[in-house]
Image: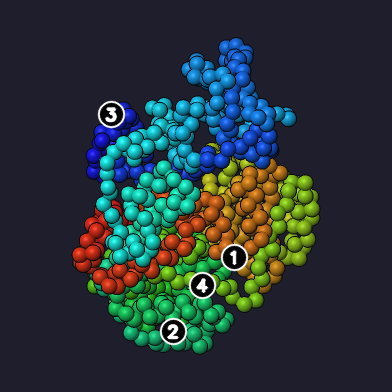
Amino acid sequence: MFVFSQDTAINYLKGVGPEKAKALSSELGIQTLEDLLYHFAYRYVDRSKLFSINQINHQTSFVTLEGKITQIQEIGTGRKKRLSATFQDQTGQIELIWFAGIKWIKPSLKLHTTCQVYGKINRFKNSFSITHPEVSTQQNTQKVKGIQAIYPSTEKLNKKGLNSKGIEKIITELLTKSRFNLPQTIPDYLQKQAKLLSRTQALKEVHLPSNPTLLKHAQYTLKFEELFYLQLQLLSLKKGRKQKFKGFTFEKVGHYFNTYYKEHLPFELTGAQKRVVKEIRTDLGRGTQMSRLLQGDVGSGKTVVSLLSILIALDNGFQAAIMAPTEILAKQHFQSFKQSFDQLGVDCTFLAGSTPQGKRSDIFANLKTGKTGVIIGTHALIEPKVQFKNLGLVIIDEQHKFGVAQRAKLWSKNKKGLPHVLIMTATPIPRTLAMTLYGDLDVSVIDELPPGRKPVKTIHQYEKNRLKVFGFIKEQIAQGRQVYWVYPLIEESEKLDYNNLMQGYEALSQVFELPHYKIGVMHGRMKAQDKAFEMQKFSEGKTDILVSTTVIEVGVNVPNASVMVIENAEKFGLSALHQLRGRVGRGAKQSFCILMSSYKLSSDAKTRLETMVATTDGFKVAQADLTLRGPGNLMGTQQSGILDFKIADIASDHAIISLTKSYAEKVLEDDPELQKQEHFMLREGLEKRKAQQSWANIS
């Protein structure tokens, strides 16, 4: 019997060898036997239930049948050749078909001998068949498992004989013909409290399940292990950051804050906004660097919260910087903030790539002397020439649009210490994902819209209703409203995308003719100043319809635009649809979002469109998106492998995430440095898992 350790190289396992080992390493990152054991099935099939042929119907998928093969014949010639066998039990008969491997399959089939057949039911006209079934004779039916794991593989591995069946074979070899006992990763007391299986038993059951109950228990154990270590890691990072990174103490709330709050605040803050402002005020007064994520739906009022945060910085003698990913969005922030700062006598300036050289020297000088209190701009803010007298607060909008290194440059703009950081995102993140992805940040959520804001009415229309949609749009324009008409980027070629948009523009121009209607067009191939010009015309009400690609997705605020038409809506992800819808509904009038689609909809596309019609709650939309697509895509860019789960599923494992977080908090409260004897394995496991994730100290 082979004795191994978890770090033994994969090529020492019987049935692998150098070629297969190389393929497993390059395709799946499997290099050691432990790596192999942590390559989990993505689904299971239950082969323990025997069907009889007369039980098969249109809903039947995979079946296991027991009976005898009564006839075998080869049909056709050349490429059209197939092997056909008649399989019979006491209730009827069914055809078994093979199109490949006929030479070696045919001799293995025994006539009139009891055997088991397993495979997927196919229906052609009114008869059923099974294509490429697995056939096992009575001698080896005992070996057929009840619950069988189906493993992810790749085309390259398939060619090496390592399809799901091949991977299952080497894992079975390892688990049944080897002697091993994997070291525990969870302390005994915690294992008992959380009712976990031993690691060795959990891995055996998850690959070779004895029964459904034990399989479920094994999955729970391994998910707990994975998520518990993630929570430990994130909480340790958060604690370390708070100890390591001392921040400026903003001791007072003074003239600027109080004057604005009492005299200039345009509306009463919502309860959620008041709660978040209080959280930020507490953070700024602690003496450790604030690193807080502020998330809220489109239109929830993140802007006024960030403005009040800036006023606290100014009250304490510090400067503030706001960095946005695009010039349009940065300019919009500048325009909305400048009026408030002018009322308070605060010098606020704008800096972007398009800022003329002549103006730049004045901007740089005023920042360095402290005359300018607030600067708003794009990544131009991180240029070396931009130096502050006393930068105390940095606000990043739409953080996933910036690289870690870019953000880090802004942090280093104050030589005396680290500025406080507020990251704003308009992509609502389900609580489960926020707890996991941003476990090292403090998270504030604005989860209510300002009073009086009417939810956008969302309507799904098929192509046959296009004339009805045109009529509705004409009515809206007659009432003085404006319309966004968005086309997707549906081709990989920029040229084809452009053609698709321009064809749409021409078609609309025939329906909405000059001089009655004015149509603008905006797309990614235009120069920045041309896009800005078109956007400006639309903002000033000089254009009725703006035909555009998704370049208008982020940061355009035109209160009079109350209709959004999205062509080929089935081609968009949920997150993009929700962001686009957020461009309307910013004024007092009722707004509409019309989703145009073809009749051919995949089940996922149907779910997306139904979700959009059913709710305007960004958090519910994001939860549906998470369930459909997983967490990586939801964030735009996935953070350095932090969500590279092997078995846990962030969309469905809410309960285990919460449970592991509470256990991790208790452990670190009791033993912050994991110095106790019973936590030795935790410290070791944590070190092992600490990949290069220095990003966490920055974001």
Q: CA distance from mark 3 to mark 1?
A: 53 Å
* In-image side of 64 versus 476 (left or right): left
Q: Amino acid at mark 1?
A: Asp
Disc with the residue nearer the chain's start (4 vs 2): 2
Looking at the image, is mark 3 or mark 4 nearer the viewer? 3
- Secondary structure of the residue carrying tag 1 is loop
What residue is disc 1 on?
617
Q: Which mark is residue 257?
A: 2
Q: CA distance from mark 3 to mark 4?
A: 55 Å
* In-image side of 226 versus 553 (left or right): left
Q: CA distance from mark 3 to mark 2?
A: 69 Å
How would you rate the neighbour count of disc 1 (Cα within 10 Å): few for under 14, some for 14-19, many for 20 or more?
Answer: some
- Position of 212 relative to 686 (above/below): above
What residue is disc 4 on?
446
How would you rate the neighbour count of disc 3 (Cα within 10 Å): few for under 14, some for 14-19, many for 20 or more?
Answer: few
Q: CA distance from mark 4 to mark 2?
A: 20 Å
Q: Nearer the viewer, residue 200 or 586?
A: 200
Provide residue 493's location: percent of width, then percent of height: 54, 38
User: Who's the residue at 47% across and 38% down the image?
Assistant: 145
Q: Amino acid at mark 4?
A: Ile
Q: Nearer the viewer, residue 188 or 225?
A: 188
Looking at the image, is mark 3 or mark 2 nearer the viewer? 3
Mark 3–mark 2 CB contact (< 8 Å): no
How would you rate the neighbour count of disc 2 (Cα within 10 Å): few for under 14, some for 14-19, many for 20 or more?
Answer: many
- Secondary structure of the residue carrying tag 3 is helix
User: Who's the residue at 76% across and 53% down the image?
Assistant: 470
What residue is disc 3 on?
18
- Secondary structure of the residue carrying tag 2 is helix
- Position of 346 relative to 209 (above/below): below
